[in-house]
Amino acid sequence: MEFQPILWAYSLIQWFLDKLLSPIPPPPKATLGRPRIAVIGAGLTGVSSASHCVGHGFDVTIFEAGDEKSIGGIWSRVNNTSGLQIHSIMYRFHPSVKWSAGYPDRQQIVSQITQLWKRYGLQERTKFNTRVTSAKQDNRGCWVINNDPSLGHFDGILAAVGTCGDPKVPHLPNQEAFKGEIYHSSRLDGKTAAGKKILIIGGGASAVEALEFVVHTDAASTYVLARSDKWIIPRNAFVDGLLALNIFGQETIFSWIPESLLRKFFYRDLEDLAPGSEGLFTETPMVNSDIFHQIRDHKAEWLRGDIVAFTDNGIRFRRRATGVPKGGPGQEIEVKGDMVIMATGYQRPSLSFLPDEVFKEPYQPPKSFRLNGSLTARPRIARPQEYWMKRWIDMTSYLKARAPTGAFDFFTYSELIYWFIFCVAINPFRWKWAPFVFLGIGSALPKHIVYREDQIRNGLGMKKRHGE
């Protein structure tokens, strides 16, 4: 095998990050003395969060609605041809993750999640086939799952249900008349597009999933039927990293710079496919480099417009010109195909198991927060004040009001920095936790230090909060 210096350096960096930042896994069958946490969901976020918790001494139980094959969440349910759209260096969900490729496929992603689950002994802490329908506090302030005390009493709840649930499959006019095949973009394993004319309905992340299938199975031709204008950005770590520097996640006075560069160096002769009036940061862009290659090789075509109805041999489509809004006038054509792929995304998982007070405006999900006073095992000064938590939410919501995914729907480092300012930086007694907040480095303070801090704070006249 040929020596690849960049990949070798990448592997070395990952090894170093693992040794420096990964929490030490607890011994098998260990009794963990810190508060008990119920993690809802065994997807990427649930497994990663649970591993950090047990690595720092918290007693964790994961509740997963599916069986063991569900580990990995959405990644356990997509096609084998699916892969990561962004570079893996931007997808490090735990310090111990070790990628062997820049854009790993679905199998490697699930493998890394499963290895993490096993490394931190989460097999014995996971309850499969247990769908959570309610999470309520008893008279002692402990959380009970599904009104069943036998499942345990918990000091905190971590809802890690993700953003992608069951496939979203709309029924379109005259759909039953179509003589070809119809599949959702996540249900393509075992299917083939070889020699077929493929119609992809949708132009977002699910369309990328469909395009990966089409490229791998050698379709005769592909038409992407997109209702809205979507920016397409290349699969390039440097380019994607530069775009990610926009911490506001929305249009700014400088957005014209990356938009102009993309038109000139990425779209080039296909500049008419770039959105006419929509800015790069007004919607989540589509990350794909193959589609332009397919178009230039006359194997694919990108059509902007609205679906009218299915026909026996394809779809009637109202094609719109650049700048014409959704539902606007256009030329009605029939696009013929043998297979239709519904790249229509996924249903949003339900959070209905949470208490009603979580959904009170203006701090309903994803802006919700709950200060659980039963977590008395941690220092009192560590509990964030409700006033400052609300100010953090208010300011972040204002700054990211125009972001396509909202302020908290897609959590970024900007939200973490704002939280750090409002909940840590304002209090000198919390500065010592900065390495833990950003890097996960740190351990519990001895009780005598905590008590001494209490004396100093009280001597300075700092007001105690209710219950302290």
Image (cartoon, helix red, strand yellow):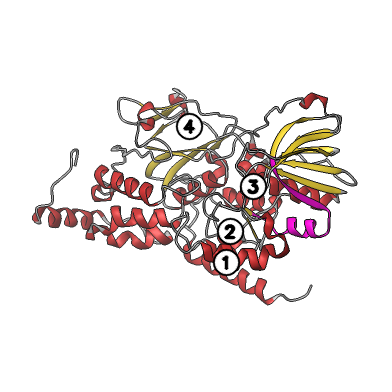
List the residue tagged with mark 4. 351
Q: Is residue 75 visible?
A: yes
Q: Is residue 197 left or right of residue 152?
A: right
List the residue tagged with mark 3. 205
Q: Disc 2 marks which amino acid?
A: Val
Distance in Å between CA atoms under marks 2 and 1 = 7 Å
Q: Are marks 2 and 4 in contact (CB under 8 Å)?
A: no
Q: Disc 1 marks which amino acid?
A: Gln
Distance in Å between CA atoms under marks 2 and 4 = 29 Å
- Name the front one of labels 2 and 3: 3
Which residue is situated farthest in the right direction here?
195
List the residue tagged with mark 1. 14
For label 2, count other residues whose C-alpha is less than 10 Å away and answer few (under 14), some (14-19) or many (20+).
many
Asked where in the image residue 165 lies, by quadrant, the reply is top right
Residue 419 coordinates in the image, percent (x, y): 34, 53
List the residue tagged with mark 2. 97
Please identify the quadrant where the C terminus is shown.
top left
Q: Earlier in the sequence, mark 2 or mark 1?
A: 1
Which range of residues does the magenta coloring cover?
287-305
Q: Which mark is residue 67?
A: none
Which residue is situated farthest in the top direction here?
147
Please identify the quadrant where the N terminus is shown.
bottom right
Q: Are marks 1 and 4 in contact (CB under 8 Å)?
A: no
Distance in Å between CA atoms under marks 2 and 3 = 24 Å
Q: Disc 3 marks which amino acid?
A: Ala
Q: Secondary structure at mark 1?
A: helix
Q: Secondary structure at mark 3?
A: helix
Q: Earlier in the sequence, mark 1 or mark 3?
A: 1
Q: Earlier in the sequence, mark 2 or mark 4?
A: 2
